[in-house]
Image (cartoon, rainbow, N blue to C red):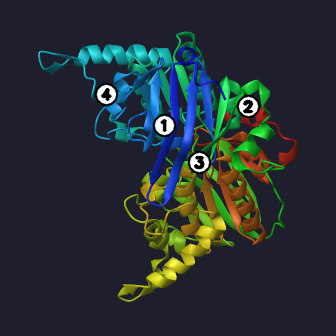
Amino acid sequence: MPDLASNSKFLLQMRGIDKSFPGVHALQNVSLALQRGEVLALVGENGAGKSTLIKVLGGAHLPDDGEILLDGQRVQVATPTAARRVGVSVIYQEFNLVPDLTVRENIFLGQELTKSGFVRISDERRNVVALFEKMGLKMDSETRCRDLTVAQQQKVEIAKALSVDARIIVMDEPTAALTTQEADHLFAIIQDLQAHGIGIIYISHRLDEVFEVADRVMVLRDGEHVGTREIDAVSRERLIEMMVGRPIESEFPKHTAEVGAERLRVENLCRGEVVRNVSFTVRAGEVLGFAGLAGGGRTETMRMVFGADTPDAGRIYLDGSETIIRNPRDAIRNGICLLTEDRKNQGLVLGHSVRENFGLPNLDRFLRWPFVDRGQERSEFAGYVERLKIKLANQEEPAANLSGGNQQKVVLAKWLARYADIIIFDEPTRGIDVGAKFEIYLLMNKLAEEGKAIIMISSELPEILGMSDRVIVMHEGEIKGEIVDVANTRQEDILSMAIT
């Protein structure tokens, strides 16, 4: 840990930060130091306190104790506006865009360019064009944010942070929805920011990124500061051990299950230009990986299999018999479940309790007309809380209060309770720490051993290669290839298919 007594060395110091919520001591005497032009990676498991610490810095939370210093001078950061005023800009993991406003309006929200009380729209547009050119981004600034993809929304959030005169930029999982090429461009922007003396706090569960961009790495575990290391002085294995508190022998504990009969067959599925003549099969006990660039048609294909979107053509067979799936209810009734890519907007009702979210797709089992058997619901959910190691204060806690990883586990729990035979995981470990990833991989192994057919969409190629029995690669709505010998396949092999 750097010597916090030497104030002049640091652009930012957070000293002895303490923060509690009902039933949770989120931060316990945590200190952080950031130098000018430095990238400090902040890592830890979900619920370790990373987001809470950043919300204290960004003015979203008031600490119970501790202080913040900029250039050695103590500052009060009581609101997000106060944080921006002193030069702190935060890109939160969960987007803060207003859906009905345009890209330009979101970027300048709260900092509009005005003259005589009127917004200078033409000046804002010019500034956005210049900003997008710097980012290598092609996007219409007058598009409403509700019409953007998840990846495009992430780019708008990054643009918002870069639009202000910030001295410190916090990036919380900035590449979660970006392709490899887009992430590389972001890293180039980070290098430019460093050259201008801007300090960056970089939060990511992707350790490859941490070792690529960071100068130092700080580890939190259970709300406490475990240690800070120069990135060149710590191995990947040691960093994982610091994060989870125990050694993990393999990041991808793949166990090959006995593969059985065909469970799902899709023939010539089509939907406009988004999905074109897609055909594939998946068998009991098999993990079928779907790889490709964002927008390649993977998610769109699985939404049709699940009945969330209507295909123009194509057939779906379950256990050899053609099955008509008109909507998600049909899919659930036929033993198909989907863990959506966007868990907040599509997987959870954030204002409802975690218990209620767990019970929603399972009401037919818990219903004792006209009432819901809350006792059975609580008892069954408690079993999944223990099994999946979900961290929550109690079952009545709103889903919005949970960390991203724990929210993902709640989504997983509600579908596991359906006892589905075909489980579709769309980006199952996005925004989840390495320890929670390991647990989900073990669970996938167990499901495969139980004879479940698993489809996994992932943008993380190590994950695809580490956990799949077969891999299908998609590009621009079409299947470009199938990989059977996964063990002898390189990431470059998949990328070459995905871009041609």
Q: Mark number for residue 359?
A: none
Q: Mark number for residue 142?
A: 4
Q: CA distance from mark 2 to mark 3?
A: 37 Å
Tell me if residue 88 comes above or below residue 218 in the rendering. above
Q: Residues within 10 Å of mark 2 (few under 14, many from 20)?
A: few
Q: Circle 3 sits on which residue?
A: 48
Q: Is residue 326 visible?
A: no
Q: CA distance from mark 1 to mark 3?
A: 12 Å
Name which of mark 4 and mark 2 comes first in the sequence.
Answer: 4
Q: CA distance from mark 3 to mark 4?
A: 39 Å
Q: Indicate the position of residue 367 as horizontal and vertical percent values.
A: 43, 85
Q: Mark number for residue 496?
A: 2
Depth check, front residue: 216 or 113: 216
Task: Tell me the element at label 1.
Answer: helix
Name which of mark 3 and mark 4 comes first in the sequence.
Answer: 3
Residue type beneath disc 2: Ser
Tell me if residue 156 comes above or below residue 20 in the rendering. above
Q: Indicate the position of residue 373 as horizontal and vertical percent values.
A: 44, 85
Q: CA distance from mark 4 to mark 1?
A: 31 Å
Name which of mark 4 and mark 1 comes first in the sequence.
Answer: 1
Name which of mark 2 and mark 3 comes first in the sequence.
Answer: 3
Q: Mark number for residue 54?
A: 1
